[in-house]
Structure formats: structure tokens, C-alpha cells
Image (cartoon, rainbow, N blue to C red):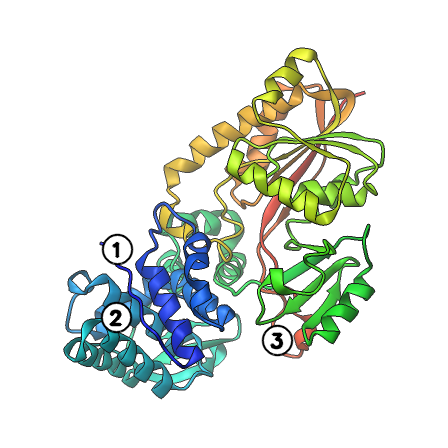
Amino acid sequence: MRSSVRASYKEPDQRARFVAAETLNNFDSASEFAESVLNKFLSGTVQRQKATDLVYGTIRNRTIIDKVIAVLSDTPIARMPEGILNVIRIAAYELIYCPRTPVYAIVNEAVESTKVFSGKKVSSFVNAVLRRISAHIQQRQLPLSQSNPKRMLPQGPDFGCQFDIDLLPEPGERPTDYLSSAFSLPRWLVAGWLADFGFEKTRKICFASNRKPSIYLRTNVLKTTPENLSEKLKEAGIEFQIVESTMIKVKSPKSVTALPGFSEGQFSVQDLASAIPVKLLKPKAGWKILDMCAAPGTKTTQLAELTGDMSTIVATDIDPVRLGLVKDNIKRLGLNSINVIEYSELQKITERGEKFDVVLLDVPCSNTGVLARRPEVRFRIKKGAIEKISNTQLQLLQNSAGLVKESGKICYSTCSIQKEENDFLVRKFLQNNNSFRLETEQLTLPSTGPSRRGLSEAGCLDFDGGFTAILACRV
């Protein structure tokens, strides 16, 4: 049963925690994205970033957090009211994964929040559970190299929170169970990664899937330069780092829409991995391009910018609501080379025999490469769904083949790292379409960036995972 709780707090930290609790109370991980629910409540705090971190961090680590609560509470989780459980989850997340936040602040404010909507008796229960969890934490942050892996909950590649009781299986004896439990990921998914990538790579994927993702701005070079945009960020007191020529990594308590240059269309938000497909394609001015799955328009606008707004781009998407986001982004960025059409218009294009130099096909997928940004996916993705998704992807790829000129290309991309959606699917397509050849392909595994040991903060670039294949017509 969902619940909505409202109260007024004077302290920004308390409001952030309260907003986080309200979001989780109204969030259904089986059918919603956390972002859409969170945005309804963010106006309730000036610490929007803190509230966001609490929501996403709690969701990413919810399975192991629930295990900690279950082991150290006398009351089964199933008997705890949802609102109370979410307050405890958020506080447990902070105790385990936010070692710089004082214990007294975490516990006291969780207790005060509970008093507001459930009374003193229930707040005493929350206090007892959190005090017991805290009492069983030996070190809130300890190097992983100095830990007992069965008692250490990893916070990142280098550090973790050490308990005085066993919470995890032995990784050497039960690697699938260990990684699945430690990172709150589906067991079948981890098992598949272990078979495909081995333990060390899978472990890195798990860390990356639970990281707090960095924000990268793609400079709109048609309006400004990375240097000029950086100067604006500097004047606004925003921490930043220029990476990969036009990309800027930012660290800011402000929302993206409040950053200087946003309303002027001087940048778009795009992860480093998301930018790879269009870069591999190397689009040229004068090309006629079809973007079949364009929403929300990140890659569509990237195409326009890289071609100097001198190509002809037709963009569509099966979701009419999200297609509206494409239009919004085009207008904000001041682009003129993109024509947005309804998805039903594709049939007319096919009937007319209209052909394109390139079809960009950024297909709907399992999202296993972006679990850090879409943490709720881990609770809804099912093993059997991968086959269904791949069938849809193959059909879209087959449809796009009929829209390409004799000398044209298909740029196929996913934000998945599953072979069934990537290289296996591409090879299945090529077996049935000998008029195409594989020009290039790239699998990008999600990364936390280099270890911090011996590296400056500037040297740590994290990114999502994904796959790209450029399929060229045989001339």
C-alpha cells in the first residue's frame, strides 16, 4: 500500500530525507522510473541533490539493505508499515554507504521524521533498529583489502563498510551469490555476466552498476565552445573538468536545468558511453539520416551538431509523449536540420520507397548497461524478457534494412551489455541479410573509472555500458 506523508521542516537536511521518504513511499519499482516520482517532490527541499542521492542510493542497494534490516531487527520486514520501512531503509543506506554523515544525525532525523507521521511509539522502534544496525558496524569505511569479504558491504572499488557479523557468502566459494547479494542484482543476471566476462570483469560491472553516475555535458559547438562554457561554469562556482574534446564533467548541487548555458541551448546532458554510437558513425554534412527510435533526442541532436546542422535528419519514436521531448530539445538547442514525424509516417516513407544514407537504430533494450542511472530496472528485468526484447530488436533492424540506400549504413546501438541483444543479434541479422557487412562493433562495459589509489579525482571518469554495430551495405 502506498502512502503519502507531508510535513514541514526547518532544516534542509531533514527536508531532503523527508522528500526521499515520500518518493519511496509513492514509488512502484515494478512499473515506474524513480525519476518521474522524485520530480514530483523535489520542490520540497533546497537540497535537491541530496534527496536524489538518497533515493537512488537506497534503490540501488535495497536488497542488501533489507537483508541487514531483517537480520538485525526483531520484526520481520513484511510486518513493517511501508512508510516506516522506507525511513529505516534510507537511514540504513546512509549508515552503510555515506560514512561522512554523522551517525547521530542519521538516527536522530530518522526518529524525528517518524514522530511527525507515526508517533513516538513507532519512532522508538525506528531508533532501536537503527541503533542496533549502527552497533554492529565495526568500521563505516575500511579498505576492501583489509576486510573480511563476508562482513564487508562494498561502497566502491576501494572501500566498504565492515560489520561484526557475516552478511555475505564467501566470494571464492559462491561467486554468483556473493556478487548478487553484495550489489543487490538479480542472480541470473550476475550468473550470465560471470559466464561471459569472468569474475574480475563482472565484479567491476557490479561496482559500476551501483555507482553514483557522473554528469557529463556535451557542448553544442554550433553555439559555443567547451572553453567558453567552462568559463560560465567557473563564474557560477561549478566544479568541472573538460574531457573528450566537447564533453565536460560537472559536479554541482544545482539541477541541470539551472546550470548556466542550459536555457541558451549551449549543452545537452549525455553520458560518455551514449556518445559512442554517433561518434563511430562519423556522420557527414549532406547525409540524409533517419533516427527510428529518437526519444528523447540526445543522439538525434548529436547527429545535427556533428554535421554542422547541414544534414537532413528525420526523427521519430513510437512513444508520442517522449517524441515531444525531441521537439523540446531541438528548439532549445536551436537546430534546423531535424524534421520530427509521427511514427505512423514511417509506413508512408516505406511505401514511397524513400531511402536514407544512414538509419540510426537506438533500440529499446534491457538497460543492463545503465543500471546505475535506472536502478529500478534490477527489480523488473526478467530472464525470459531478454528473448522477447531481442525479437523486437531484430524486427526493428530488419525493418531498417529496407530504408537504407545501396551505399548506406545502419548504426545499431543499445544500452545493454547482454550478448543476446548485441553481437549475437547482429550476427543473426547478417546471416539473413548478406547484402550487409559488419563494418565495426564496440561493446562498452560500464565502469567506475580507475581506482583512486595513486590517481587524482580528475583522473576518475566513470561511464555507462552499451553496444554499437555499424552495418554497411555491400557495394
Relative depth, front residue between 356 and 120: 120
Label 3 vs label 2: CA separation?
Answer: 31 Å
428 and 310: which is toward the camera: 310
Circle 3: residue type: Arg
Q: CA distance from mark 1 to mark 3?
A: 41 Å
Say which residue label 3 marks.
452
Seen in the picture, residue 353 relative to 4 is either above or below; the reply is above
- In the image, 298: left or right of 138? right
- Amino acid residing under circle 2: Ile
Q: Residue at x 71, y 56 (%)?
A: 267
Placement of the C terminus among the 4 image quadrants: top right
Query: Whole-percent x and y of residue 39?
Result: 46, 58
Q: Viewed as shown, does residue 75 lie left or right of 356?
A: left
Of discs 3 and 2, which sits in the foreground? 2
The residue that appears at 68% across and 58% down in the rendered structure is 262
Secondary element at tag 1? loop
Circle 1 residues within 10 Å: few <14, some 14–19, many ≥20: few
Instruction: Name the front one of labels 2 and 1.
Output: 1
Residue 293: where, in percent of width, then height?
59, 34
Mark 3: few/some/many CA within 10 Å (<14, 14-19, 20+): few
Locate residue 69, reporting x and y percent. 25, 70
Quadrant of the snapshot with the N terminus: bottom left
Disc 2 target residue: 69
Task: Work out how far the residue at label 2 is from the one at label 1, CA to CA, in angstroms.
Answer: 20 Å
Question: 92 and 302: which one is in front?
Answer: 302
